[in-house]
Image: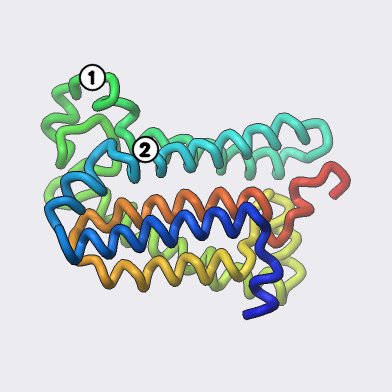
């Protein structure tokens, strides 16, 4: 544990303190005033959701900054990897707030009114037949990806040289173990919240921790001009 704590930067400590407060208040409100938890604390376009979008956008902008800063020093594979991640996180930020639809009071098109579970302009609430895309892709598939990325990939990276070379070649940031521990801790804390709105808090934790990963991954040399 002491070794793990030594790897934390001041930014890590501030971010984890922030998440402790968010989870702590969430658990408190969910168990004392569920209506407040659902309709105020985790309400659509409330603080939790907007903060998630901002952290996701921050990750995208950070990656884009590094893409342009190191453009002339890196090969095509590195550029594809980092640009792909930047696009994914920009998309995630937009989806989180339905691309600003409610903020700017924009009505959904007929297509989204008919095919979106919440009648919003986003893809993660789309319904195909009787299957919700959010449940299929953004829950089940994302869970599998996170398990592979947070637990399996770091082990393989440290053990096999070819995995290390492949990850570094495509600018894939490898998590430090405190990132993994924080995700697992957040997952356990969700058990103390009965409301389905608890996933809003989990999404915020996701966005914060991934920003920390991009700021200082285990293989931080991928963001060096000399590597």
Describe residue 146's horizontal placement relative to residue 13 as left or right. left
Give the Cα separation between the discs numbered 1 and 2.
17 Å
Name the element at disc 1: loop
Rendering colour mode: rainbow
- Residue 11 vs 28, above or below: the answer is above
Q: Which label's residue is closer to the chain start, 1 or 2?
A: 2
Is 22 positioned to the left or the right of 16 in the image?
left
Asked if residue 200 lies left or right of residue 35, the reply is right
Total labels: the figure holds 2
Task: Say which residue appears at 26% left-offset and 71% top-offset.
Answer: 192
Q: In the image shown, does 14 or 139 lie closer to the viewer?
A: 14
> Looking at the rendering, in which quadrant would you find the N terminus?
bottom right
The image shows residue 21 at horizontal and vertical percentages of 41, 58
Asked which quadrant contains residue 12, the reply is bottom right
Q: Nearer the viewer, residue 17 or 131?
A: 17
Residue 151 position in % (x across, y down): 54, 72
Q: Position of residue 13 (x, y in %)?
A: 59, 59
Contact between labelled residues 2 and 1, with CB atoms less than 8 Å apart? no
Above or below residue 105? Residue 10 is below
Residue marked by disc 1: 106
* Residue at numbered disc 2: 50
Q: Secondary structure at mark 2?
A: helix
Point out the residue furthest to the bottom here.
1
């Amino acid at each position: 544990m002491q070794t793990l704590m030594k790897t934390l930067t001041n930014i890590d400590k501030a971010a984890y303190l922030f998440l402790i407060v968010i989870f702590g208040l969430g658990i408190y409100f969910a168990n004392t005033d569920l209506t407040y938890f659902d309709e105020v604390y985790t309400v659509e376009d409330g603080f939790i959701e907007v903060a998630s979008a901002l952290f996701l956008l921050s990750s995208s902008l950070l990656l884009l900054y590094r893409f342009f800063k190191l453009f002339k020093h890196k090969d095509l594979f590195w550029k594809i990897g980092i640009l792909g991640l930047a696009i994914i996180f920009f998309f995630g930020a937009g989806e989180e707030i339905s691309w600003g639809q409610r903020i700017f009071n924009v009505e959904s098109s007929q297509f989204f009114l008919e095919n979106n579970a919440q009648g919003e302009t986003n893809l993660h609430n789309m319904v195909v037949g009787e299957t919700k895309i959010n449940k299929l892709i953004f829950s089940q598939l994302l869970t599998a990806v996170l398990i592979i990325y947070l637990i399996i990939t770091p082990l393989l990276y440290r053990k096999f040289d070819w995995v290390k070379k492949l990850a570094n070649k495509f600018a894939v940031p490898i998590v430090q173990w405190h990132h993994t521990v924080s995700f697992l801790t957040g997952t356990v804390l969700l058990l103390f919240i009965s409301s389905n709105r608890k996933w809003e808090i989990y999404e915020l934790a996701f966005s914060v921790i991934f920003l920390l990963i991009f700021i200082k991954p285990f293989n931080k040399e991928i963001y060096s001009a000399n590597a």
